[in-house]
Amino acid sequence: MTYEELKEKAHGLPLEPGVYIMRNKDDKVIYVGKAKKLKNRVSQYFQDTVSHSPKTRLMVSKIHHFDVIVAASEFEALVLECSLIKRHMPKYNILLKDDKGYPYLRLDMKQAYPKITMVSKVSNDGASYFGPYGSRGVTQDILDAIRVTLKLPTCSREFPRDVGKGRPCLNYHMNQCAGWCQTNMTAADYRSRMEQAKQLLQGNFKSVASAIRTQMFEAAEALNFELAANLRDRLNAVEALSQKQLVTAGSIADTDVIGYGETEAKACFAVLHFSGGNLLEKEYEVFPLPDDKAEAVSSLMKQFYLSRGLVPKRILLPFEIEDGELFAQLAEQQLGRKVKLHVPQRGDNAQLVELACKNAYEEAQRVTDKEERISGTLSLLGKILSMEPPKRIESFDISNISGTDIVASMVVFKDGKPHKSDYKRFKLEGLANQDDYASMYQVLKRRFTHFKNGDDGFSEAPDLLLIDGGVNHANVAVRALEELALSFPVFGMVKDDRHRTRSLVTPQGQEIGIDTNQTVFAFIGNIQEETHRFAITYHRQLRSKRLRRSALDDIPGIGPKRKQDLLKKFGSITAIRNASLPELERYLPRNAADAVYRHFHSETQEENS
């Protein structure tokens, strides 16, 4: 289907809840979405494409046709959306990279030498399963702690096949394994340790400690002090493990705090797991900048919990999401557990959300490189100004003091970076008095006359013109362009009381605030400062040259070399003016010194007469 056909089909959809399925030319599903009103939601893809993120624009360009499924309710649409995303894993949906679910620990006591392994789901195979735990990292920590406490093997040897084959490994010599590969170790003792491991995973620390303590006393009474010492060490390890509340801490959190952060090009969804007020673990997912952050958080939250098959009692969110209540219903229906979603505004919970958002921002910042930042900033600027991301930006500023030495600067940013080889400086002509509007008109007229003539250094067209000043300055620029039959996007740079650009203004007077978007605010601020610096530097050069010329250049016998020598010896024009004739004759021939002395002192005599 053509773009217009897709647009027409979207406008013909019903105002009913449902799911839409975007497909490419190969009939592959590339995006699945849910809508309260199918017509309104799907039509947005084929209308204001400028406001879309680069990823969404690319997705829209790949759509060949789409299908919709009308649902009886929003809840039914949500269930269907989750199911279709899980089935098709569409390329342009924001997807979790790891949706294996919360890990479990598996122990099968039917084996002669049982092992504890980490698994992603529970199977009906007669084995014992413990968990689920907050993440694979937490689960591995629990497994390692159990193994070290009971000195269980971590090697790949198979028992009883490998008993007596080879020397014990490094863990044995580090006292972290009892050396089950040696012939003096029995299968019965191994199974006893595994029974204790099972008890520890069930949280029965006291019963395990009691059994070990009894064995320790029996060994001591039998004068087997080496065994008693080993049992004492194991008892201490179990008691230390109990104090860590390992199983409680590792189990699924009672509160999850979701954070969202974004840079110029990347966004991050972070989840902090809390149990009993203690932070257990952080999980996060980094993805390209979305069009709608609330929609992105909602989508990832559904995947995060539904794929794991478990939700906490409470989830704290950074902002409201449209599907919050529907998600709570779905979690209760599919997972059999009620969950409360809350957006805290103040207090400790608000601080927890702030912490989660900070973590999310740091992770997004970490994986965003310099080029992505620049590209993302230009995309944001284009989105704010309802235009394509500008590749070439030209900025203009006027500099003068009381109408003297009026100059202008043209600064160029290409692909978000200063392109100094294209900078231009203009010395204004025919303006006796300070008139910023006339100055700006002249500069724009001269710059784009060169452009129309194809002159070297002026032949490249801008994507965006930024004019230092407000709506009147922008209108002057538009008038200059119109007289040359040209048209480019023009915006004035409106400053705040600290001389920073707080907003951009159209020639029609519409102000577009940028001070709330730190990324664009800083970028436009850099352009403004660079344009002003370039203009003021040129102005100072001309003014300094004029002032120096008026003082020395008209004196007979004083050329550039002698002028330079005088300034070097005396340090300033004022010192030369105040020098006596003998002092001048130390550095100049008598006639030249006399000319300099008479030049300055004749001025003084005239002023006094």
Image (cartoon, rainbow, N blue to C red):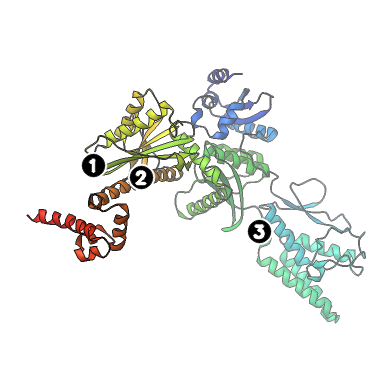
Say what amino acid the circle numbered 2 marks. His
Residue at numbered disc 3: 248
Say what amino acid the circle numbered 3 marks. Thr
Q: Quadrant of the N terminus?
A: top right
Residue at numbered disc 1: 403
Say what amino acid the circle numbered 1 marks. Gly
The residues bearing labels 2 and 1 have C-alpha atoms spaced at a distance of: 17 Å
Dots 2, 1 in contact, CB < 8 A:
no
- Which residue lies at the image location 54% right of the left edge and 29% below the top edge? 36
Residue 59 higher or lower than 272, as above or below? above
- Which residue lies at the image location 65% right of the left edge and 25% below the top edge? 24
The mark found on residue 532 in the picture is: 2
Q: Tell me where residue 341 sits by quadrant.
A: top right
Few, some or many residues within 10 Å of mark 1 (<14, 14–19, 20+): some
Dots 3, 1 in contact, CB < 8 A:
no
Closer to the camera in the image, 345 or 128: 345
Point out residue 54 in the picture as x, y percentages from the top left corner: 55, 34
Choose mark 3 or mark 1, whichever is in front: 1
